[in-house]
Amino acid sequence: MITWVFDMKLMHIFHNQQTIRELADQQRGVILLFEIPKILKPQLPPINQIKKDNSNYGIDTNWVKIPVHIFKDNALLNLPRFVWAKKSWTLTQFHFEFFKLYKGLIANWYKDLKNNEGRSSFNRYLPKWTDPHSGEMLDFDSFSALSDEDKFSALFSGLREESWKDELSKRDWNIEDMPYQLRVENNAGYSQDCHFCSNYQCRKNCPVPFASKMTVLDMLHKVGVDDNTSFYQGKNGKSDFIINLIWHTDFDKSFQKHLSGVVTGVHVEREEEENELETGQKEGLTIDDCFKEFKREEILDEDNKWYCSKCKEHVQATKQLEIFKAPPILVINLKRFK
């Protein structure tokens, strides 16, 4: 799938009739390609049957792709993801299947802690999950030996079907009870009732129920659709079922780096530009190259968040320098060293 992402939020999924020129017209943000799981056997239909909102690429219509926006401390943490779910899954099954996609992050974190034992930067927070059978504290080896069901029980010990409303409604929860919460992104509109709790001007994003009597299709129906297609129609997902994955505030950078595989995220095009500049240092840089580097757009990191007066929160804003007006004589200082 070819998508347009801006400020770490999914903005558009390009449909099968859009052109390369339309991809290039996106002036801000990045173009991201998401691989569809091979087990779903995706395929394009014959050229004469291609539709703009062909959202499943030949996949059984019982499957639906659900965008996931990732948060920590009320701020977007990482680039969006997709989860493919069966519409017939119960929501307890959905929670479990979702966990299976992210269990590797927890395992890698345990492994990282094992390999860096004694280093304070890796031990500011140590996981305190316990074996659901023995009650002993888990480490990399004991966590890896557990079945997926036992891993889920260990990490989500506070999640019960009879009490999920109370547990998932907590803004400050114990990490020993669950490492993250799944919430439904409220896209009903400012003056409309929330699709899920029916409260006027709900802004808290309701939790995804941990309920065996509700299905993924039920959640789609609450939005008023049978499938997620509005990202194809230029509506920025206003009619889609979207998940917010909210990591517990105690997770630090020693864990967060596993979300993308690197300590800090790097845009693909930026990496390519840096490679070009490296080559240019051997072959000779032009003034144009220097201006492009000066004007490069960047996203502020976690330590340099900007306060947004509109949403009343500190966010990772986009920063870019531009030459608004040049003097009659422009003096340029060239750095001698890299």
Image (tube, helix red, strand yellow):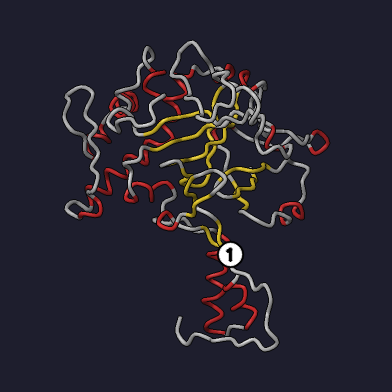
The residue beneath circle 1 is: 320
Q: Tell me the residue at 19%/51% (across/down).
A: 117
Left or right: 42 as drawn, with respect to 92 = right
Q: Secondary structure at mark 1?
A: loop
Residue 326 place in picture, x, y as percent: 68, 80
Could you say where residue 113 lies in the image, as x and y percent from the top left?
24, 48
Q: Quadrant of residue 231?
A: top right
Instruction: From the viewer's side, name the closer residue of 146 and 261.
Output: 261
Residue 165, position in %: x, y?
41, 18
User: Which amino acid type is shown beneath numbered disc 1?
Assistant: Gln
Q: Residue 311 vs residue 108: left or right?
A: right
Q: Give the camera-side residue of 203 and 72.
A: 203
Q: Residue at x 66, y 33 (%)?
A: 238
Total count of labels: 1
Looking at the image, which residue is at 51% across and 14% down? 214
Quadrant position of the N terminus in the picture:
top right
Q: Position of residue 258 (x, y in %)?
A: 38, 48
Q: Is residue 24 left or right of residue 9?
A: right
Quadrant hosting residue 191: top right
